[in-house]
Image (spheres, coloured by chain):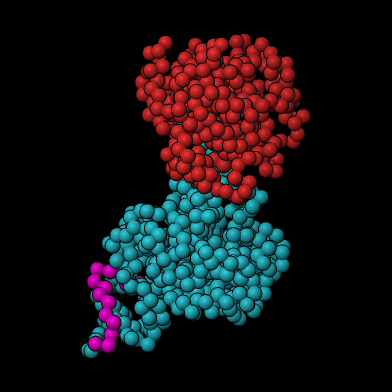
Chain colours: A red, B cyan
Amino acid sequence: MEFKHRHLLGIEPLSRDDLHIILNLADSFKEISRRRIKKVPTLRGRTVVNLFMEPSTRTRVSFEIAQKRLSADSTNISVAASSVVKGETLLDTATNLEAMNPDIIVIRHKAAGSPHFLAREVNASIVNAGDGFHEHPTQALLDCLTIKDHKSDFEGLKVAIVGDIAHSRVAHSNIMALSKLGSEVRVAGPATMLQPGLDELGAKVFTDVEAAIEGVDVVMALRIQQERLGGDSLFANTREYARKYGLNRERIELIHPEGLVMHPGPINRGVEITPDVADGKRSVILEQVANGVAIRMAVLYLMAGGSPDDIANQK
Amino acid sequence: MDILIKNGRIIDPSRNMDEKGHVLISNGKIKECGKEAKLPTQTSDIRVIDGEGKLVLPGLIDMHTHLREPGEEYKEDIASGSAAASAGGFTTICCMPNTNPANDCRAVTRLILEKAKESGLCRVLPIGAMTKERKGESLAEMGEMVESGCVAFSDDGDCVSNSGLMRRVLEYAKTFGVPAIQHCEDKKISRDAPMHEGVLSTRAGLASQPSVAETSMLYRDLELVRLTGARYHAAHISCAESVELIRRAKSQGLPVTAEVTINHLTYTDAVCMDYDTNTKVNPPFRTKADRAALRDGLKDGTIDALVTDHAPHTSIEKALEYDYASFGIIGLETIVPMGLALVEEGIIELKRLVEALTTAPAKVLSIDGGTLAVGAPADVVVIDKNAKWTVDETTLRSKSSNTPLLGKEVQGRVTATVYNGSLVHSV
């Protein structure tokens, strides 16, 4: 098997085989994180820059841990510490980084297409760690890995994503990843949170959350991201949202008896999900976080030019 | 010096002419034109241009250009914009008032006209602001601006959202006999979104604006036209619904006209998918169905004029994230090859293309030009429709190069432009 992409800009450019390569590779990498000495020399001498132009804790830390476990030299640039506050453009920031010859740049940015812009301008491999409302490919991959841990096959699975689909890069990447893997993806939310074209992306669109989640194998709740709405009004208030769309004990009984509850975090407890559901027996939310490290190790390994077969042969 | 353009294919929509012949220019006027043209016996004092195999047209008129002066001369100024215009085949351009300061009083209007006269490469007709400082709060000094040379009024990119004020704008402009031009956009709906709302904006993950941001304002304005009887021109309409609204208004006899940009006739939202900021424009490129409706509208005359909406920006505004880049594409120097490409594809007839760039805008604005009639001011353009050239910083006269065609080879080139009897451009 061969992985031909120099950059990970999104799920959209990837084939089903590409997705399986990453998932299988991540499976192999999981074991490293369970060792007492959690480090392999695979990316020794490689330089990775984590360019986070938007606040992030979970994703940034996950990438950082993945880099350390693969022995890459990494450095972090976050928005508060960067030259951006001094008025430097993204292009200048990137070309200055490029002058120091990094192998990989991991970028998070609130403007969609920023990773694509960088990929045209610099030689380093670009990994998209979330761009605007566009994509968050490593999140979708870790979600798929978590599903794979529990379900034998993606084919025929029903997965429901509930919340502000329009402003969720996680939803967009998951719709594409799960559709490519053969699952049925449903999205649910008030019409204010469902933009046109979702059906053409391959999702079944619901405004009735109960109808959407009935019998599904997986339900994902999305965080209400008030800070990204720029004053747009998409729902009356969090109280009504919780009542109409929140995952609570009664509602969760509608999903398949062996169904999983997922959330990309951070959670607004009591808004999109009640604490008992978030912490309940169906919840795999913390497994998602653990899998994030393995997925990012796999992605970094491939970006550094590693062959999927080498890791498979080592086993 | 007199000029003789020999043996060209002359297309003059004002006289329904499409024939091989000669154009003789003397004392700034058209002296002879057509297959019957009498050639002078002595040509030693005459500049002779070989028109064999070339198109000879009335000088083109662009009723929607941004020259950036005063205020943003690093992007374009009246001299560089005029040079771009004459290189692109235009002998008349109308500049929008979104300068700094805005062209909202006769002092700015006079400055523009003075600068244009200095460069002398084409006729620059200013479009004044409808409201003071283009703020949409109170009427601008339209009376004095018309006296000084403004041919129409518009707040350009800032649609007048206050309906009561828009009514007064129409009435006031009517008083001075000029049309009001509106960029129809409800900013509460469009929210400055960079892309048309649809499946492609969902795939690109970009904020998006639906067509109703345009049509809701257009509908309102058409009803205000019905109320006031004022002349109204819809700038750069971009969607099928707008074409339909204009068609209906015209059939009801309202004094309404409309324009479309060459870019909206050429591109759809698919061109935005690579996040090339040279595709970011407002209104955004819409769907194939919208583009088809715009093409039909131009063909059947529902849309009167074809324009560039030449909007120069430098890398400072464009080498950015898509969300943060400025809206706008240049067009003065590319409209000829782009228009001829549409003719080549069979999308529009050559005669209608020429009309939409000459007599049609002249009629919308009640200005002279756009004709090769004997005695008319000699504005003539000669085009080699087979010549190929590459669009880049070295070939463009504009100070800016923000176009999706950057680096691409195009076919069709202006080889000579005569403005007011003088040869101002030739290659």
Q: Quadrant of residue B301?
A: bottom left
The image position of residue B157, as x and y in percent, is: 59, 59
The image position of residue B367, as x and y in percent, is: 50, 76
* Residue at figure coordinates x 60%, y 20% from the top left: A289
* Residue at figure coordinates x 62%, y 48% from the top left: A86
In this view, which residue lies farthest toward the bottom? B42
Residue B281 in the magenta stretch? The answer is no
Q: Total label count?
A: 0
* Image quarter of the C terminus of chain B: bottom left
* Residue at figure coordinates x 28%, y 85% from the top left: B46
* Image quarter of the N terminus of chain B: bottom left
Q: Quadrant of residue B143?
A: bottom right
In this rendering, position of residue B379 left or right of residue B260: left
* Residue at figure coordinates x 58%, y 78% from the top left: B110
Depth order, front residue of A5/B113? A5
Q: Quadrant of residue A59?
A: top right
Q: Is residue A140 visible?
A: no
Q: Is residue B161 visible?
A: yes
The image position of residue A127, as x and y in percent, is: 49, 32
Q: Judge whether B201 appears above or below B88 on screen.
A: above
In this view, which residue lies farthest toward the left? B41
Depth order, front residue of A120/B324? A120
Depth order, front residue of B23/A120? A120
Q: Judge whether A60 appears above or below A276 on screen.
A: below
In this view, which residue lies farthest toward the right? A239
The magenta span reads B44-57
Q: Judge whether B139 appears above or below B45 on screen.
A: above
The image position of residue A248, as x and y in percent, is: 71, 19
Q: Judge whether B308 appears above or below A194 on screen.
A: below
Depth order, front residue of B254/A312? A312
In this rendering, position of residue A217 left or right of residue A119: right
